[in-house]
Every structure is written in structure tokens, then in C-alpha cells.
Amino acid sequence: MPEKPVDEAALRDEERALRDRFPESVREAAFEKGELTVDVGRASLLEILRFLKFERGFSSLTDIIALDLLRSRGETASRFVLLYELTNFAARIRLRLRLEAGADESAPSAVPVFKSADWAEREIFDMFGLRFEGHPCLNRIYLPDEFEGHPLRKDFPLEGRGHGL
Amino acid sequence: MAFKEIELNMGPQHPSTHGVLRLKLAVDNEVVLSVEPILGYLHRGMEKLWESQTYTQIVPLTDRLDYLASLSNNLGFVLAVEKLAGVEVPKRAQVIRVVLAELQRLASHLAWVGFMANDIGAMSILLYGFEQREDILDIFEEYIGGRLTVHGIRLGGVPRDLDGPLIARIKTVLDAIPHTLHDIQALLNENRIWKQRTVGVGVISPAEAVERGLTGPPLRATGVARDTRKDFPYSSYDDFDFDVPLGKNGDVYDRYRVRMEEINQSIRLIRQALEALPPGDVRAKVPRLFKVPAGEVYHAIEAPKGELGFYIRSDGSEKPDRVKMRSPSFINLQSLALMCQGNLFADVVGILGSLDIVLGEIDK
Amino acid sequence: MTDGGSRPPFLLTRADQFITWAQKNSLWPFGSGLACCAIEMIATAAARFDIARFGMELFRSSPRQADLFIVAGTVTNKMAPIIRRLWEQMADPKWVVAMGNCAVSGGPFPTYSVLQGVDKIIPVDIYIAGCPPTPQGLLHGLMTLQEKIARSRPTQEIFRTDARETG
Amino acid sequence: MSPFVADVLIPAGKIVAVILYPMVMVIVMIWLERRVVALIQGRLGPNRVGFQGILQPFADAVKLFFKEDIIPRDADRFLFAVAPVLVMFSSLLAFAFVPLGEPIRVGSYTLTLWIAESPVGILIILGLSSISVFGVIFGGWAANSKYPLMGALRSVVQVLSYEIPVGLTVLSVCFVARSLDLVEIVRRQQEAGIWYGFLLPVSFVVFWISAVAETNRAPFDLPEAESELVAGYHTEYSGMKFAFFYMGEYTHMVLVSSLVVILFFGGWLPPFPSVKALAVLHKIPGFIWYLIKIMFFLYVYVWIRATFPRYRFDSLIQLVWKWLIPLALVNLLVVAVVRFLL
């Protein structure tokens, strides 16, 4: 229910700029419900984030979201997906980058580009068990260190595995 | 003095960590060397729980996130679901939502100034703020029955229309708030002790604030004009005329002034909204077992604490596949360590208070 | 209290009345907020409801000086050992009020990280339902606690005139 | 009057009275504080126990008496036990030197309203009240815990710093009165026809601010700053030991208020002691005037507490070293020169 028509042209511009700059890394781009999601390769994630931040005005990394696609993909090695929500406040547009965490369940840390990624990545490590290479201090943020398992994985039961008292 | 560096543990049970936050401090003769927040003492597994609930069931659970502003949580979640499902909300409901969300902002800020002043040692302000807040909670109670966890915004609209007596009551409360605000500001604004404790304390530069994802009043206190209500208008906020108060120095005092001015702006907004209530229904037809079409969406609103975003991914069933909340307190708290460095131990309490954190939405 | 046995001596009964009168009128709560209910607890202490009328406004921040532990909010597994420790730090006689559904039974959070009721780790005197309970609800719970204290026999702790010894 | 009555009974009675009088004042003060703060905050305050809640402090005291007495395992047991006693009795002992009024003639016997009169009474009182800081540091140190230790350290720095302006301003009063005897100081105010508070306003203001700071009360209540240090130096104390700290603080407040009244507001003298038209005020016993004045200053204590935020430690120390001490010194110099010339 977007009250204001989203500036689709502006988003398409961003997509084009990304494709021009990173022809190999940018794969698909989906425009849905007024939001643009761009699939990127992990090798150039930091480059893309830097490009968006310093040259395209996406000054804020609003959030990092992890998904466990166990239900649709099954027990494959690459069931985790990371989404990076970026906001350009000057142009008033949002952009979402989509990154496959891959078989080794890890991703490059975005902290060198956006300091706000720090706790968001720790949270994903805690909840999903994905590792971020280059993160300054990757440890559990919510659960105690001795907790076993990662609750937001789809195969983790809601009531836990009896690690309580 | 006898000791050099000592390590102090503040919390998780400490009078002024606003809940069960734990801070690990390294202190050298009362000067703070480092602060490390340790979270998770209120981690309730909300996001996991939501995956097993229907959309309708999740709305009351969002009340328990930022429990000082439950209606804002409702609004954020409901708007995201509606965006995903393409529900058209009647105009009257949109305006009533503005009224409710702004009343909630008033309540949240009034409680905040009380907690903040209490942390700095001015205990009466807490009572004045809470007394005024009670009047707002009375409106919620009359509207839908809840005081704290209101559940006053539902999928597709609002549960009840605003009727004449209730509107009159809201207007009476709106008339009273500026008096309370004046009392509070008379006690604090030019108070020398208050200024000593807040001016130039916990400073963060605009660049650092943006870099660390700060939102809400702490960001606006640095002079960066960002307000989701203006930048990405929702629920017909763009129909109304209001200002975004800004600070200059990004210190605790400016955060206080920004919030106080926001109270005035919210009053202005509610008055306009009450005048401009369009006729019509207050709720679109939404089935109780609401099957949301598959897809993903991110929607953010301006909660009293900052940008509150919900990412929802649906697989087409009546339960979401994943809900991720961007809680403003969580992201704002990241900047605490930077703000505290080099300040005195006594100021940690004030700086923490000035961020307006609620553990419910930090730990989720 | 005495089941079928002899009644406690008159003097001890008077002493009991005197001590419980003081105890029930001077319940200093431990200022411990955990979650949503803490806000309602503060609202109860604020001007509208004013817990001070019962002499309970002295929220102690040190557990040593408190008599009453209002467990106001969700107790998580991570927090549970701390709650237990704080309770152990309190000086006897002490009372515990489980405020809100979370503290009573885990409330709406049957999840991996939430303790399903604070009575699993500490003994609870009064349970108050609600999510969160209104200030009126909390006050009612506290007044019920006062009645419970008035029925207690503290001198029996000292002199053991009760049949409890055998039982 | 038999020697037994004059030498044993009356002094014994006076000793009991001098212990009871501050105690009653403390209990009234605790009740008053809770009610007045409540009124300022738009609440009611304790009103259930006894008439208007007047029995509330008794209930608290009885309850604390029956509380378990916890000594932390790692604490220094002796100092831990001694500390609250020091705090309580140092200020209680000082009351032996606080006169309550002019001597009363009962037949041939002159009943003095003080236990001990000393030509250097004010010095003894200041000395005794300083002992309480030892109680605070013993308590904070003996508990073997971080927050109490920080509270105790703050308290020592604060109390020692604020003793200096207190001493300097008291000295200025003594210069004017040419006496260190409290009874004498009041009599001189009667002779002068003006309370010294109006004659030496700077001394009074500096003394009052420093005295509030010395009693660790808001806005200078840093040693027990709740939002920072949990409960400060008495965090680990429970039961009667805590009650001693609690009551010691209030006893100290009553003592300081008595001193302010004696030094600056004419003790038991009625207002305008030299104005003939107001001679009717002399009909009211001096002791009543004295109590009214003390209550006024106790009320100011509460009023300040309910109004102001708390100082931060560095600005607290700056206040005393950069403002109060220089001000007190200059004031003393001016008073001394003027007194010498007159």
C-alpha cells in the first residue's frame, strides 16, 4: 500500500549504474512492490557497498537481514541468503542487495564500509550461525556463549532443545 | 588516588540501565575508558515466535517490543503487511492512525524526559511526566481498553472509530500538555546543574552518527534532518504540516531539546488530523486467517525512538516465513561506546538515558 | 496456622501482631524492572496510583535493603541465575510477587530463551495475572500480600511453638 | 533540692532527653520528607499507618529491627559492624553540646538546657560531626565491593573539601561574636539586635551550601547516587545496620539545621528581638521558636531534594574549590578587618 508512487525511474537508474560498474557481479534485479532487489556476487560485495555509499549517495546501511530457505531449497548446502537494506535519504530511495551465503555459510563483513553493520552481523551470527569474515569481534550477542544451536534456523524448534534450566 | 583502572559491571540489574542491559565499563579514576554493552537478558525469541503465528496474532505481540510506544510497533508491522498484501486502507483509518501514533509519541517522550531527569537526579520530573502520560493512556483505555500494550492498530485499519466525546477528550489533553511541558522546561532548560550534566556531554558528530546508523532524535540532535515521516511518508503524513526539530551539537542537551520540541510538533499534527478527519470506514475487509501473497517487503516508520522497520517475507501461507525487525534502540545503542569515551562515569548514565532505549526491542 | 494443637501463647500472638503490622506496612520493594511490567510498576509508583500511601515508595536499588521482590517482566534463561542470586542477596524476611503473565508462567513466549515461570527458581508469594497487570491489579496483589503477612507468625520462627517442628 | 536529684537524676534525665530529642526529630523528619516530597510531586505519600501516616517511620524501624543482618563473606567484620555505629553516634554525641535554650530557673536550681557547655563548643561539634566520615569510609571499604568503595571515596573527598568553607564561615561568626561558645553566640545576637544571618549573608549562604554537601544530601548526594552507584557506601548493608546509616544521615541533618539556627538565626530568640512593638513574640517559649526554625531548614532540605538534579563529581569539587573556599576566605578577611576597625 504505497501512498506515494515510488520513483521507479530512479531505482532503475541505480540498477543501471550498478550493472555498468560491476558487469560480472550483478546478476538479477527484481522490481517488486516498489522495491528493487539486486543479486550480487560475494567477491565484490564490499566494492559494491563502497560504490553505493560514496558515489550513489546510499549513506545508510539500514539493516542486514538473513534468510533460511530450508523450506524452499531443502537441506542443500546453500540455504542462507543475506539481504542488505540501503537507504539514500537525499534521493529518498531504498535499495536491497541480495547475497547468497553459499556452501561455507559465510560472507564478507560489511563493517569496513558501514560501522552500523557491526551488531547486525553479530545478531545474524548468533541467530543463524553465519560467519562474517573480517568482523572485528564476532561473538554471540543475545544468547549465552554456551548455547548450542542457532534459533532462527528453520530446523531449530521454537521451544528449544532443553538448554534451559 | 589509590586505584588505577578498575572494571565495573553496570547491570543487568542496575537502577538506571532501563531494564536488563549490562554494561561492562573500564574506569580510570571515574573517567570512562571503554563501554561494552552486553545484551540478551530480555531476548524472548520474538522473531522465531512470529514464524509460528498468523499475521493477526503477531500484531499484539509487537506491543511487547517497544513497550513505551506499543502503537508505533503495531503501525510499523501492520503497514508492512498491508504493503505486502496490497491492502488499501480507508483514508479515515489512516488519519486515525496518525492521531494514535502521535499520541503514542507524546506518551513515549513524556516518559522519556522523566526517566532521563531521574537518571540525572531530578526525581520530581519523572512524576510530572508520568502524570501527564496517564492522561494519554486514559485516552487509549477509553479507545480500545489497553493502557500500555494497546493493540490499537489492526490489519486493514483501526478497530474503532474516534467518536465525538473521545475527540473532545483528546483535545482537552492536548491543551493540558503544553502546561506540563512548560513546567518541566522551567525546571530544566536553564538549570545550571542540568546544563552542566548535559551540555557537551555524549557528543557525536553528524558524520559518525550517520555512519553508525543512528536514527530518531539522537540523529536529529546532531543537525541531520532525517525523519521517515518526511522522507518516506506513510499513512498520509504528507497531508499534514509539521516541522522536524533539529539540534546543533549532538549532545545530551540537544537530544532533550529536540524531544521537547517534537512534543509540540506532535500536538500540532494531532490537532490538524482531528480537524481533517475524512468520512468513511475505518477498516478494510481483512480475513482473520489472512493469507498474504508470496513476496518480500521492507517498510519503515518513524517511531519515537527512530526508524522502526519491518522486513516481511511471505511464502503465501497464513504465517510469515520470516519477519525481521529493525529496532531503532538496537542500532542507536551501538553508538553508546563512542559517545561515552572520555566522559566521566557519572555521565554514562545520562548518555544512556538520552538515547531512549527500550530493552524489549533491543533484545527482541 | 496451628493444626489442632495448642494455641500459641498470648504474648507471642501479640508480638506477632506487632511485628507483622510493621512488616506489612513497610514493604520496601526492590527496584527491579525486567520488561513491560516494569513500566506499569513505575506507573503504580507515580502520582495517579501512588504506592507511597502504603509506605512502599522506597524502591531500594540494593537487594540487601529490600523486603519485596516484584518480578516485573519476562525472565529469560540468561537472566534467571541473576534473579536467583538477587533473591538470595535479600535479607530475610522477604516476599516475592510474580507480576504479569511472563513471570507467572512464561506468558505469550513459549520459546527457547524464556523461563516458563519465575517460580521455577524462586518461591513466589503472590501471582498477579495480566499482560501487563494494570496498576490497580498490582495494588490489589500487594494488598493481598499484606493480608498474607498479617496472617503469618514470625515468632514461631524464633520460638518454634508450632506443631510444624514435628511435621 | 537534694544533691541526688541535682547531680544524678537531672543529668541522667538530660542525657535521655538529648538522645530522645534528635530521635524524635529524625522520625518526624523522615515522615515530613516523604509527605512533602509527595506533595511536591502531586502525590499523597504515606497516609495509611496511624494518623496521616505518622507511624510510618516506626513501622519502618520495627521492620528493620526484625530483618536479617547480613555480613558479606569477604567483608572485614569488625569495621563493617563499627561503621554504622560511628555514623549514628558521632552526630548523636554532638547534640550533647547543642544548647536548646536559656537556662531555666526552678526555685533555687538553674536548669541548663544543654548537657555540656564548653567555651569551644562549636569546635567540638564540628570535630564530632566529622567523625561520621570515618563511618562512611569504613563501611564502604569493609564491604569489599566496588560500588560501596567508589561511594566511600566520593564521600571522603566531598566531605573533607566542604569542611573547609564550613570552618571558614563559622570562624567569621566567631569573629563577630568574639566567642566559640554557642550559648554566647546566641546571646551576642540578642545584644546586637540582629541575627547574624542578616549581618553576614555571605557566610550564611556559603555555610548552608557546604552543610548540605557535608550531609550528602541532594543535589550533592553523590556518595549514594542511586542512578550511578546503586546505593553507594551502604549498598551491602541490611537490617539495623542500614537503619543506623539511614538515621545517622537524618540526625546529621537535624544537627546541621540546629547549627544554622544557632549561628545565623538567633537560636531560641524570637524574630526581631529588639523591636519593642513585637514584644508579644517573647511570650512564646524560646524552645518553640527554635523548633520552628529548625523545621524550616529541614523543610528546605526536602524542597531542594525534590527540585534539583544531581551534581556531577567534577563540578561538585570545582564548586567548592573554585567558588566557595575563595568566597569564604574573602568574606572572612572582610569580616575580620571590619570587626577590627569597629
Image (cartoon, rainbow, N blue to C red):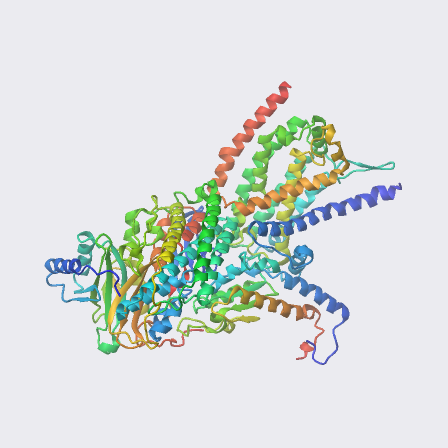
Residue C56 seen in this snapshot: yes
Q: In this image, D290 relative to B105: left or right?
A: right
Q: Residue lying farthest right?
A: D2
Compare residues D314 and D157 and report the one nearer the observer: D314
The residue under the point 14% across, 67% down is A28
Q: Identify the image quadrant of residue A82.
A: bottom left
| D238 relative to D266, above or below | below
Side (left or right) of A106 relative to D221: left
Q: Which part of the image, by quadrant, shows the C terminus of chain A?
A: bottom left
Residue B304 in which image quadrant: bottom left
Q: Residue D149 at what x, y percent from top left?
A: 52, 50
Please identify the residue farthest to the top as the structure is shown: D341
The image shows residue B270 at horizontal and vertical percentages of: 38, 55
Q: Is residue C81 left or right of residue A84?
A: right
Query: Residue C56 or C116: which is nearer the viewer?
Result: C56
Q: Is residue B182 above or below residue D173?
A: below
Q: How many marks?
A: 0
**How far across and how far down the image is residue B56, in percent?**
36, 73
Q: Is residue B339 above or below residue D110?
A: below
Q: Residue at x 50, y 46 (%)?
A: D309
